[in-house]
Image: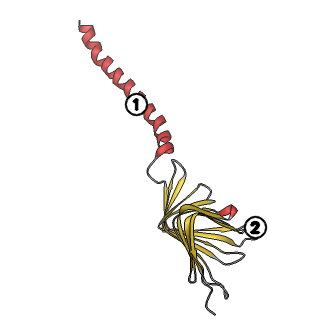
Amino acid sequence: MRRISNLLPLLLVLFLAGLTLWLRFAVEKGAPAERAEGSLDPDAMVDKLTLTRLNIAGKPNYVLSALRMAHFPGDDSTELDAPRFAKKGEGPAITITAERGTLDHDSEEAHFYGNVLLVREGAPDRDELRVRTEYLHIIARSDIMRTDKPITISEGRSVLSGVGMELNKQTRRFSILARVRGRFEPPPK
């Protein structure tokens, strides 16, 4: 009986030591995988971000800026507060602003949400063009902009509205997908 009572504390200590060792390995193995798959916490945050993409000649192709950027490692997503996209090059400059946005992992695709405004600068013979919507998807590499939400396009006193739009700058093709309505007025002389 004495032997059992002397062994009981030793067995209890060995059991606790084994449990502690098992818990340590379980936590160390599980923690990185859980963080990588579904973390809600950003791993990087930047205030007043400016991202410039250069073309082959080394000149700016487009500039993306935001008041704040947060990167989430779980799905490799990036969220932007008050994003601004500016593209210059051949033809008039285009600027897009919104309340918030997201980028894919290589910054080639952007999604803009909330009070999206696209402005194409005017020319001596043309007024500024403005497109308003609640969502805009930009594929920078292909020069494509699209939405499936209602849009309003204005140029001078002319107004065009509808639901859904696709603009392909490379092919110079512009489409409004449904419920198209418009009023065209010639510019004043």
Q: Secondary structure at mark 1?
A: helix
User: Label 1, on which residue?
Assistant: 23
Could you say which quadrant of the image residue 154 lies in? bottom right
Q: Secondary structure at mark 2?
A: loop
**What residue sits 60% from the left and 83% below the top?**
185
Which of these two is toward me, 144 or 153? 153
**Quadrant location of the C terminus?**
bottom right
Q: Residue furthest bottom?
A: 189
Above or below — where is 109 with respect to 27? below
Residue 43 x %, y %: 49, 54
Which of these two is toward me, 121 or 15? 121
Instruction: Tell me the CA gap for discs 2 and 1.
Output: 54 Å
**What residue sits 23% from the left and 8% below the top?**
2
> Which of pointers 2 and 1 indicates the residue nearer the eye?
2
- Label 1 crowd bin: few (<14), some (14–19), many (20+), radius 10 Å: few
Residue 173 x %, y %: 70, 67
**What residue sits 51% from the left and 47% below the top?**
74
Residue 186 x %, y %: 63, 85
Which of these two is toward me, 51 or 92? 92
**What residue sits 26% from the left and 13% below the top?**
6
Above or below — where is 8 with respect to 182? above
Could you say which quadrant of the image residue 170 lies in? bottom right
Which amino acid, mark 2? Ile
Residue 172 x %, y %: 72, 69
Q: State which tag comes first along the sequence, 2 or 1.
A: 1
Which amino acid, mark 1? Leu
- The dot on residue 56 is 2
Proximity of marks 2 and 1: CB atoms separated by less than 8 Å: no
Q: How is the image coloured?
A: secondary structure
Above or below — where is 189 with respect to 153? below
- Label 2 crowd bin: few (<14), some (14–19), many (20+), radius 10 Å: few
